[in-house]
Amino acid sequence: MADVLELLIAERDRIEHAISILQGTAPRRGRPPGRRGPGRPPGSGKKKVAAKAARRGRLSAAARKRISEAQKKRWAEQKKGGKKAAKNTARRKAAAKASAA
């Protein structure tokens, strides 16, 4: 008799909880929607190696210009379909096949 009573009480609690969820009166579990906390404080994560940031290089204006001119030359060669562009394309295809095999 006591077992049946416990089962009925448990079933009643589940039903009441389901009703309160459907009505929106149930207490929420977890973080409320739309509220984002401040997250981790700065510096709490893994420390990055400072030496990498210190060694980061910067391109000079002259170096950027040289790179830009070289790329424009490659594009022009590719656009006109010259031997050099075809040769480079064939070389890349051969390298791709070799790496795939």
Image (cartoon, rainbow, N blue to C red):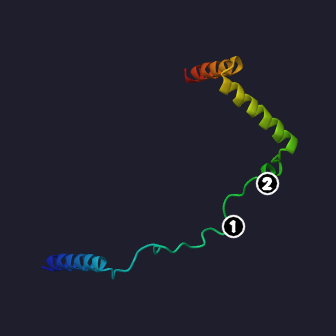
In the image, residue 79 sits, relative to residue 28, either above or below, namely: above
Secondary structure category for the residue under label 1 = loop
Q: Residues within 10 Å of mark 2 (few under 14, many from 20)?
A: few
Q: Hey, what amino acid is under mark 2? A: Ala
Residue 16 as seen in the image, left or right of residue 40:
left
Secondary structure category for the residue under label 2 = helix
Residue 65 as seen in the image, left or right of residue 31:
right
Please give the name of the residue rendered at 83% of the width and 36% of the height, measured from the top-left corner: 66
Residue 60 as seen in the image, left or right of residue 89:
right
Q: CA distance from mark 2 to mark 1?
A: 16 Å
Out of 73 and 101, give the one closest to the viewer: 73
Out of 37 and 64, give the one closest to the viewer: 64
* Residue 51, horizontal then vertical, whole percent: 81, 50
In the image, residue 68 sits, relative to residue 41, either above or below, namely: above
* Quarter of the figure with the C terminus: top right
* Residue 78, horizontal then vertical, whole percent: 67, 26
Could you say which quadrant of the image residue 24 lies in? bottom left
Q: Hey, what amino acid is under mark 1? A: Pro
In the image, residue 59 sits, relative to residue 34, either above or below, namely: above
Q: Earlier in the sequence, mark 2 or mark 1?
A: 1
Out of 58 and 99, give the one closest to the viewer: 58
Out of 74 and 41, give the one closest to the viewer: 74
Residue indicated by mark 2 = 50
Residue indicated by mark 1 = 42
Please give the name of the residue rendered at 78% of the width and 37% of the height, measured from the top-left corner: 68
Please give the name of the residue rendered at 60% of the width and 21% of the height, measured from the top-left corner: 93
